Amino acid sequence: MSPVPPEAPEPVAELVRAQNPDRWRAALFAPADRRPGLMALAAYDVETARVRGVARDALPGEIRLQWWRDAVIGKGHGDIGGHPVAAALMAAMARHHLPARALAAVAEARVFDLYDDPMPTLTDLEGYCGETWGALTQLAALVLADPGTDPGTGTAAGHAGIALGITAILRAFPQQVAVGQTFLPADVLARHGVSAADWSTGTATGALKSALREMTGHARHHLDRVRALLPGLPRTTLPAFLPLAAVPARLKGLERADFDPFAAHAPGPLGLLLTATRAAFTGRLPR
């Protein structure tokens, strides 16, 4: 596989390249006729994930997410076809037989983002990641599989979603703290003796760092599960899992002794593209 610019509607492709670069890079390695579907899913991810920042209040946010749920289940309101991302998503659903229920569940799960309620348990967090990052990974695999067939990627997609989700949440920790929100599970924080002040005042205490190390360990566990499953999956579905190529380097950064959880930095785009390229050619995720 070699990277080829994705052929998708320009507004959709530009949105994904700017806001969801890991999935944009992954789409470069998919066949030309599958790239628009992957880009539509990635754009839908962007649209639902950024509702809190766009709406700035829970009620308008819920209305916006309900609009997306209605759109994917065929009960849309207004000019759905006039919305570039919605139009691209409807086309992808029709072409690749994507299940409306799974897409609607992504928007439903994102309602949690609108509020400052704590994530109760690690199990709850894993469920949330499965309904968002995991579901989108599985939907991407369906786009890449033969139409109407089950590629057998569900278990790997679930583990991928948790690894991707935990890593993304840890990297977004400073932004979450700034708005009074944390996705870190309450049971994990309690296990390490982390108080609200430890994460809400910008103080990188030993207890907080210990809790974050536990979370990176959970991400690594699920990443290893994907590594074990990947050789048994259809090679055609590999681009669905290529966003994971960036995870090992990001976890290493999060685990550095001098890492400041309130000032995270990501590896450069060129390095990530090279990492994804190696993964695409070898069929293996980096360590």
Image: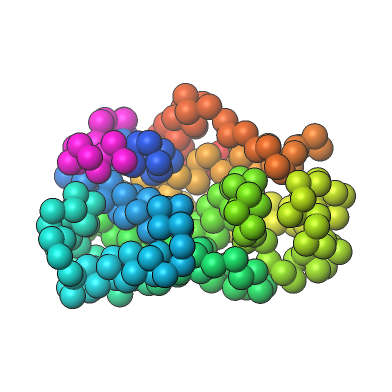
Q: Eyeballing the image, is 151 above or below 102?
A: above
Q: Eyeballing the image, is 150 above or below 198?
A: below
Indicate yes or no whether the magenta region holds residue 170: no
Which one is in front, 228 or 254?
A: 254
Q: Residue at x 47, y 24 (%)?
A: 270
Q: Residue furthest top?
A: 270
Q: For this view, does 129 lie left or right of residue 203? A: left
Q: Where on the picture, by quarter, is residue 249?
A: top right
Q: Residue at x 78, y 62 (%)?
A: 196
Q: Give the magenta part as a residue range.
A: 2-15
Residue 189 image point, x, y percent: 77, 64
In the rendered image, which quarter contains the N terminus? top left
Q: Is residue 193 visible?
A: yes
Q: For this view, does 276 lie left or right of residue 87? A: right
Q: Is residue 45 visible?
A: no
Which one is in front, 82 or 85?
A: 82
